[in-house]
Amino acid sequence: MTELDKRQDRSPVPQGWTYAPAPESTDVVRLQDRYGLYIGGEWLAAKEHFTTISPRDEAPLAEVAQASEADVHKAVAVARDAFQSWSKLPGSERAKYMFRIARILAERSREFAVLESLNGGKPIKESRDVDLPLAAAHFFYYAGWADKLEYAFPNRTPKALGVAGQIIPWNFPLLMLSWKIAPALAAGNTVVLKPAETTPLTALLFCDVLRQAELPPGVVNIVTGDGSTGAALVDADVDKIAFTGSTEVGKAIQRRLAGTGKKLTLELGGKAANIVFDDCAIDQAVEGIVNGIYFNQGHVCCAGSRLLVQESIYEPVVEKLKQRMATLRVGDPLDKNTDVGAINSREQLERIEELVAAGKEEGAEIYQPPCKLPEKGYWFAPTVFTNVAQSYRIAQEEIFGPVLSVLTFRTPDEAVEKANNTPYGLSAGVWTEKGSRILWMAQHLRAGVVWANTFNRFDPTSPFGGYKESGFGREGGLHGMEPYLDFE
Ligand code: NAP
Ligand code: MG
């Protein structure tokens, strides 16, 4: 026996790895009991309020204002006033405020990350490592364009639009706010933003960042409320609506705005194909599949919710996937080891349950790894369906939960046909060693974003948006600035 063998003999490798709880402290977050509406740089009282809770244990967090139609009109009028001076500021001055906002977000990122996980249910490691860095990065990036508009759009004389009404969803509350507010301000517009009903708290904390950055009053206004507040904003005297959310509401907004001359961008749902060819690096692909569908509990419009596997490697891929799923830790979003957090709301949980029941009924085979779900709060175990036909609801409808449907294909043509066989067209993933195949696939997939040998990658410089029922207009990059400008 060598020296090394002897040593290994004495200290056996542990058989099971368990994680001790690693809860992030919530002390860093100071919540008010009740929030008003942030209009004209002040907190205005509202007539009605609703309670916002934490989906991890259903505990109430704060009372939040329900903005009425009159409140929304007031916010828009204040934003229109503020537009007079804000749009006349030199771009370099607007940029200074935006750089400040970016730096403050970075400085206060722990506080924001904890609050995001508390109110929305996403794992703290995601809000800490993805949402917050990206939110700050969007302000940094667009601040850089504010004084360079005529170089960004040469020979086109860009001009600010006026007041932008922005309506955002609950899956990336602060990140969606940043995606929308940063390009609008860089272009010289003022903003009225409505956060989602279930996740208003980071948008309300963001008002404190605006105060700290000394942004002129009225340039950004935050009105909380439900769908009726959103509808009031669509009908108010705004120059543009930017909406992210469901296709159903997106369509309703498009109908309302037809003929009004207001500009519109829609970022709606998706049913992305994650396409795995038999020459790929299988272990990396499995990581990409897991990231594609279980990241943020699958509450991701560009989630890789349809896995298309080349038939020749179907068995090893599905087997490795199931093994990997068994290692996912589901539970308290504020635990630093958690991979899959809480479902955002009871309503969303019921929608997931309904679609999963439909999948079973239609004949698909379900697998869920053994995992103990907390008793309180909203939870759903990571799920994969095999034996799925293209016609099944779970292969057609957006589930917006941690539920993957697996289909197979034989040739690249068949993969493209199946991938495009959906009303949506937001994103897709391709896993192959062959560069030429990646380019060919990217040309043929009807998807706004195609990731190659990776998934769910974001960068402020890169445009994001959809085809077909996934909406129109782009966010991110210079493309994301264009919808906030008029050109002579
Ligand atoms: P949603 O109703 O479309 O919500 C998006 C935003 O629009 C929220 O702020 C919402 O307020 C507001 N809203 C609702 N009705 C409105 C109206 N008539 N006019 C203007 N604004 C309105 O989506 P959801 O109810 O949160 O989720 C339903 C489904 O949408 C999900 O299951 C998922 O499939 C999809 N979804 C997609 C995305 C995405 O990123 N593309 C994000 C979220 C959800 P409330 O918060 O009060 O509803
Ligand atoms: Mg809704």
Image: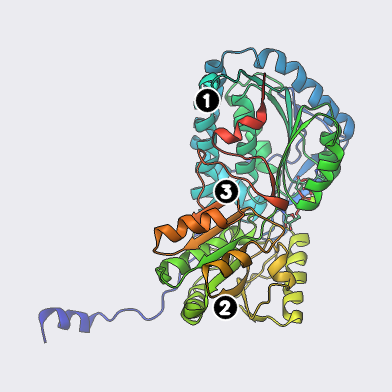
Query: Relative to 324, is 486 above or below?
Result: above
Q: Position of residue 36 (x, y in %)?
A: 77, 34
Relative to 31, 70 lies left or right: right
Q: Position of residue 298 (x, y in %)?
A: 62, 61
Q: Position of residue 432 (x, y in %)?
A: 43, 64
- Residue at label 3? 114
Q: Residues within 10 Å of mark 3 (few under 14, many from 20)?
A: many
Q: Secondary structure at mark 3?
A: helix
Residue lying at 49% horizontally and 26% vertically, measured from the top left: 144
Q: Nearer the viewer, residue 125 or 234?
A: 234
Comparing labels 3 and 2, the label whose residue is closer to the camera: 2
The C terminus, quarter of image? top right
What is the distance, in whole Å, between disc 3 and disc 1 at their CAs?
37 Å
Q: Nearer the viewer, residue 317 or 347?
A: 317
Query: Relative to 192, is 412 above or below?
Result: below
- Residue at label 1? 152
Give amino acid for label 3.
Answer: Val
Display coloring:
rainbow
- Residue at label 2? 369
Mark sitting earlier along the chain (3/2): 3
Q: Residues within 10 Å of mark 1 (few under 14, many from 20)?
A: some
